Image (cartoon, coloured by chain):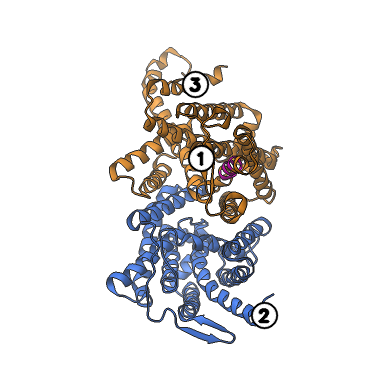
Chain colours: A orange, B blue
Amino acid sequence: MRRFASTLAVVALLSTVPLITSSNVVLNFLVVALLIALVGQGWNLLGGYGGQYSFGHAAFFGTGAYATAVLQVRYGINAWLGFGIGIAAGALVGALIGALSFRYGLKGSYFALVTLAFAEVLRIIASVAPATGAGVGTLIKLDLRPEAFQFQSRAPFYWIVLGLVGVSLMLVRIIEDSRFGAYLVAVRENEDAAEALGVNTTIVKLGAMTISAAITAAGGCFYAQYFLFVDAGIAYGPWISVEALLAPIIGGVGTVFGPLLGALVVKTLGEFAKLATGDAPGLDLVIYGCVLILVVAVAPRGIAGILSDLRHRVLAPKTAAPASLGRGHG
Amino acid sequence: MLSPAILLAAVLNGLMTGAVYALVALGLTLIYGVLHIINFAHGALLTAAMFAAFFAHKLLGLDPYIAVVFVAPLFFLLGYGLQRFIIGPAAHGEDRNILLVTLGLAVVIENALLYAFRADTRTINLPYAFDVVEVGPAFLALPRIVAFVLAFAVALGLWLMMRWTDTGKAIRAVAKEKLGAELAGIEVAHIYAVTFGLGTACVAIAACLLIPSYYVNPHAGNAFVLIAFTIVVLGGMGSVAGALIGGLFVGVVESLSGYYLGESLGQISIFVMFILVLLFRPSGLFGERA
């Protein structure tokens, strides 16, 4: 249980927020930030640990969102069941795209391009297909019962998304410590070397992409239930692909808490931008883009990297001074 | 089924559009060929250039075909500066970082335009915008014919420049053998920036050719950039001839599938083609084997 201690502590701490405040503004802010953290954790597994930078995670987010919404509205399937099916559908889409891309050896910018193209194809299909409500989108009927995955207040939504984030944190922690995780990092660092050492890199990447897609799809399912509306631009739009990679890269790419840290920082910046300019369209994304470039330029390991540097700097004098005592490294 | 005359008209129209696609793709392929990066900011720069051409007409009364003389050099400088002072230093020589930096630039440029000009779609009215020329069975809009001719003139000019000028030779040297070029006294960072500037200037010219018959809004460039990616991959990353032929081909495919499948599904055919080419022949139809 020790390896989950930090995760459990963070989740426990965050879970007290609705007990302290019932402000809808605060809760809504945190729900959206946690949603981005969840979607970003999906990206982080594939991009951060596996080094495969996807520019099209909207494909999984959108599939989860549409599956949840359409199954309820058109087929009368229970929302909780729809939620599960949505995650499975997202994972399936991830596995399919992954199988195609990795089988043909797409890497680096080619992989980024092909994921982007798949997301765009799905967006165009969703914007014309009758099943998805075409251009109008799909509206989930208001039905404020827990059985329908709808709640009177925001607190239950908050706990649910926090729970999902908690699960994703633990999942990534487990993968980090596992053989599969080691293979994945080996693929990121040097794919040819990993292959030469007998790692089946295609299977490893495919596995990572499927889990990654499932996590991101869970974010999409939650989005549909929380906002009760989905259309092609929201579900498959480039905005979510950008936010999915923004959070882990700003927070610390390839670290367990990176996406959560990054999402909180990104959304806080966005809120400040809104306060400063009165919700002008586009400005928040201008700031995100600048922060993205800045982080890549000066702090490639993100906030987590800065924090660990700081910790080392603070601890450095302590370990340097009693060197004569022959103590081991702290 | 369509009659041969309509089919031919569709093909001709596709060729006209394809020439502009080719010009956008030319900028992308040039940057890829030398810097070996995919410039995700290409579409946003196209949008920015379209706005520049729009306001040159609206505020200064400049015809887009005259404005191009100013817009192209301006965007050359912009591209030079972006590569020299932002992309180059920020990327630390890592491909993954370059992807993120150009994506970041795209997000910044596109949303800065959205912030400044809102999501409104704008068009300009030119006296000749609706003039048509009869070519065989088809009536082609005059701006599209001008775009077709000028796009090829630019491609030819670029080819001549690469072939005969010192800068062109330096660019080719850097593309082939970066270290060797550096040892021979070529300043690689400068050549990289020049190349990025040239690619951006291509986009600026394409924007001026587009604006008489097209609209501009903060997302207008996106429609072109994925098509340009398709063309570049299809024609082989870094291949100028491939970009031209690929551009015309994609223009025709889009036009024909538009006739058969309707506007939005017609777009899908491009992406499907793109995905297929990426999967089965990522080195392109004319590119060298990776």
Is residue A90 shown to the viewer in this render? Answer: yes
Q: Which quadrant would the N terminus of chain B be assigned to in this image? A: bottom right
Q: Nearer the viewer, residue A3 or A119?
A: A119
Q: Nearer the viewer, residue A79 or A168?
A: A79
Task: Find the magenta span and give its range.
Answer: A62-69
Where is residue A22 shown, x and y percent of the image? 38, 25
The answer for how far apart the CA atoms under marks 1 and 3 are is 33 Å
Q: How crowded is mark 1: few (under 14 residues within 10 Å), some or many (20 or more)?
A: some
- Label 3 marks a residue whose chain is A
Where is residue A135 shown, x and y percent of the image? 53, 54
Assign a secondary structure to mark 1.
loop
Which residue type carries mark 1? Answer: Leu
Q: Name the residue under label 1.
A: A228
Where is residue A104 shown, x and y percent of the image? 68, 51
- Depth check, mark 2 against mark 1: the one in front is 1
Which residue type carries mark 3? Answer: Ser
Q: Which mark is residue B3?
A: 2
Q: Residues within 10 Å of mark 3 (few under 14, many from 20)?
A: few
- Say whether mark 3 and mark 2 are on the same chain: no
Q: Name the residue under label 3.
A: A6
Q: Residue at (41%, 39%) from the top-left corner?
A: A299
Q: Is residue A328 magenta?
A: no
